[in-house]
Image: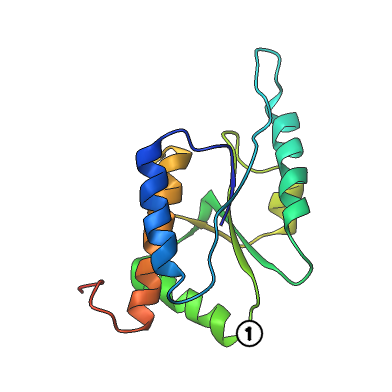
Amino acid sequence: MLCVGKNSANEWLDSIEHYAKRINLYAPFEVDIISDSKTGKKSIPSQIKKAEGQKLLQKIKKGDVVILLDEKGMAYNSLSFSKEIQKYQNSGTQRLIFIIGGAFGFSEELSSQFPNKIRLSDMTFSHQMIRLFFCEQLYRAFTILHNHPYHNS
């Protein structure tokens, strides 16, 4: 998972770390955070998104499959999301990167280069919360795929 901007709330960090450890039981997983671009009174959102997009692109390798977490993305329930994860595993995907953008979202360049997008909710949440919610859902997906009782449905 690649994220823009530091996480200032320790309680979120502890929970994200908790799920990251659990996910690693099923697949290699890490959280990489790049610094957000400075915002001020004269900041222009399109310039901020472009600068953050350039930083994100530096982290992506040839052959990586990238999915943007974006409010305009496809909605999944937990079962359908686990099936998507299974498809990537079955196709031999080496690195699947989920990106959570900055406060202004993604640059047009990044968005057009990586058209695969998912959304976690129609509601808006803080980036810190989304990081945690996504980690929990990714862990849940793996438990569904491995018939672990964590997901009771």
Specify whether residue 42 is in view.
yes
Residue under the image location 54 percent in, 50 percent down:
70
Q: Position of residue 74 (x, y in %)?
A: 50, 60
Count of numbered circles on the image: 1
Residue 90 is drawn in which quadrant?
Answer: bottom right
Would you place residue 127 above or below residue 151 in this image? above
Q: What residue occupies the far left of the structure in this picture?
A: 152
Q: Is residue 129 above or below residue 77?
A: above
* Residue closest to the eye, 87 or 108: 87
Residue 21 occupies which quadrant of the picture?
bottom left
Q: Tell me the quarter of the image containing the C terminus.
A: bottom left
Q: Give, as a three-letter code, the residue at label 1.
A: Gly
Residue 87 lies left or right of residue 22; in this view the side is: right
Q: Position of residue 77 (x, y in %)?
A: 36, 66
Where does label 1 land, which residue?
Answer: 92
Evaluate whether residue 121 shows in this view.
Answer: no
| Left or right position of 89 against 24 | right
Judged left or right of residue 126, residue 114 is: right
Which residue does the image show at 68% across and 28% down from the upper left? 45
Q: Residue at x 43, y 37 (%)?
A: 126
